[in-house]
Image: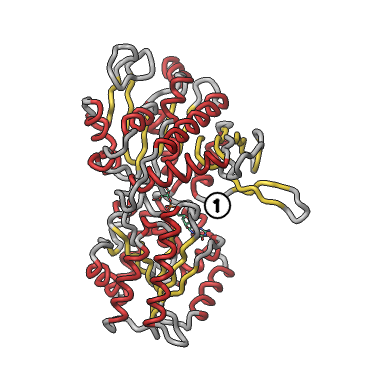
Amino acid sequence: MVSNRLPVDRVTAHDGTPSWKPSPGGLVTALEPVMRSNDGVWVGWTGTADDPQGPFEADGMRLHPVPLSADEIELYYEGFSNDTIWPLYHDVIAQPAYSRTTWESYVEVNRRFAEASALAAAEGATVWVQDYQLQLVPRMLRERRPDLVIGFFNHIPFPAYGLFSQLPWRRQIVEGLLGADLIGFQRRADAGNFLRAVRRLFHVQTPHGRVELPAAGDGKWPNSMSDQPRTVIARHFPISIDASAYTALVEQEAVRARAAQIRHDLGNPSTIMLGVDRLDYTKGIGHRFSAYAELLKEGKLDVDDTVLVQVASPSRERVETYRALRDEIELTVGRVNGEFGTIRHSAISYLHHGYPREEMVALFLAADIMLVTALRDGMNLVAKEYVATRADDDGVLVLSEFAGAADELKQALLVNPHDIEGLKRAMLAAVHMSRAERRARMRALRKKVLTHDVERWSRDFLGALAAARPTPSAVAAAEVE
Ligand code: GDG
């Protein structure tokens, strides 16, 4: 496994002894069993600048750190990854910076990840590269290790060619990705956008999501990076959550008691709306606030019996666009609360913190309505987490059609967050929805999320990868049969 961050966080005990704790998240949970049974190695950054940490084991996983300097964190990570690729791939909601300096650092760091992976992988191994920070790794790795089976998964959207073509290094990025045998995307439309970029840039056909690359050395571009012609497959594999971990938390008495306490502390309002997002401009937090404030102003919602709880967990605070966003959001919260709040009730309860997962689940249980109003989002796991926790078959999910989750969660109230009137109508429909309709919708949503969990996602991807390029041992086994 290769990802920007290793799946562990360094923690220091009171006596100063350092240790590692697995970072919370579905990806680790899904991949840990696969990694264990295949004697896997995880290659990635520890999260600390200039960390001299060598290979180590934590929680039964073998981890190989790739060191990053403070400069590289600024240029490769905060710069090219989060200030160029992130805004460009989210449809230019914020203006991407096109800087040659950050690009050069991106190339250099991707090379370092490829070198570390080439050293860590056994003969004929399967290597799975994760996400937009490492798009050049598949090709760089194939050049070093043509024996490997290489998969890549893009967690964020892939933009339409009209936008992607702005990128001065668009050819290098597509060539980098084509080093993989299988390229996974969240939505069918993302895979379609990628394939269109391949057709436009290289004038090749892509029937059924397959890119047929000619052998290296025949002068054609892109070449296969191998002495044989090679096929690359691009397809969608919608990611999901560790649903059983969420259903287990809901069964804990302490979590349910905490949910009741939250409702009580908020003054037992008839409606609690909830937003949970990293504080990111892709998440449409401002649009949500606008719709809510208008409903209060028009008297369609009443601050005495409605509250909007917004958890905005701190994110990328060293990138200027994010600092500006935080100022803008917090100004809006102040204005809305100043205008509509009373001594007893705030209109918006705004929390700029990260919370333990138990507290998040308690919030999900306390919320009558979950607002996911992303302007663009690869998937949006929060929507799936809300659904997974509602074992009572209650609660209403308002979901942006621009989040990947909308392809699967069709019984949510789907909205276009740019259409503030439409968003207001959906919020009111959620407030007034009958218990019978809430139950019918939530049941259908739960069926989807509980049967399509992250374990299934990784199994589907790895199965398709094995089929895309059978390993030498699989070929030998098939011949024996
Ligand atoms: C990217 C793509 C895609 C948030 N605050 C807290 C907290 N969280 C957890 C949520 C959820 C995760 O973080 C966020 O995942 P999302 O999918 O909602 O969004 P991104 O961070 O943008 O993730 C996205 C995802 O990758 C996976 O492929 O779905 O589209 O943008 O799990 O619950 N968790 C805790 N405390 C917090 O304060 N414990």
Q: From this view, report whether residue 226 is shown above or below residue 211.
A: above
Query: Which residue lies most toward the bottom here?
Result: 343
Can you give x and y, in whole percent of width and height, for residue 233 in the image? 32, 30
Residue at coordinates 49% horizontally, 49% vertically from top-left? 26
Residue at coordinates 57% horizontally, 38% vertically from top-left? 69
Q: Which image quadrant is residue 449 in?
A: bottom left
Can you give x and y, in whole percent of width and height, for residue 20 in the image? 66, 46
Can you give x and y, in whole percent of width and height, for residue 188 in the image? 28, 43
Can you give x and y, in whole percent of width and height, for residue 38 in the image? 55, 31
Q: Which image quadrant is residue 323 in?
A: bottom left
Q: Which quadrant does ligand 1 occupy?
A: bottom left
Q: Can I make out residue 461 in this image?
A: no
Q: Nearer the viewer, residue 340 or 448?
A: 340
Give the amino acid type for the residue marked by disc 1 in the picture: Pro
Ligand 1 within 8 Å, label 1 CB: yes
Total numbered circles: 1
Helix, strand or loop at mark 1: loop
Residue at coordinates 40% horizontally, 73% vertically from top-left? 308
- Quarter of the image with the C terminus in it: top left
Q: Nearer the viewer, residue 375 or 337?
A: 337
Residue at coordinates 56% horizontally, 44% vertically from top-left? 7
Mark 1: few, some, or many residues within 10 Å (few <14, many ≥20)? few
Q: From this view, report whether residue 134 is shown above or below residue 404.
A: above
Q: Which residue is mark 1?
A: 24
Q: Nearer the viewer, residue 191 or 387?
A: 191
Q: Nearer the viewer, residue 224 or 430?
A: 224
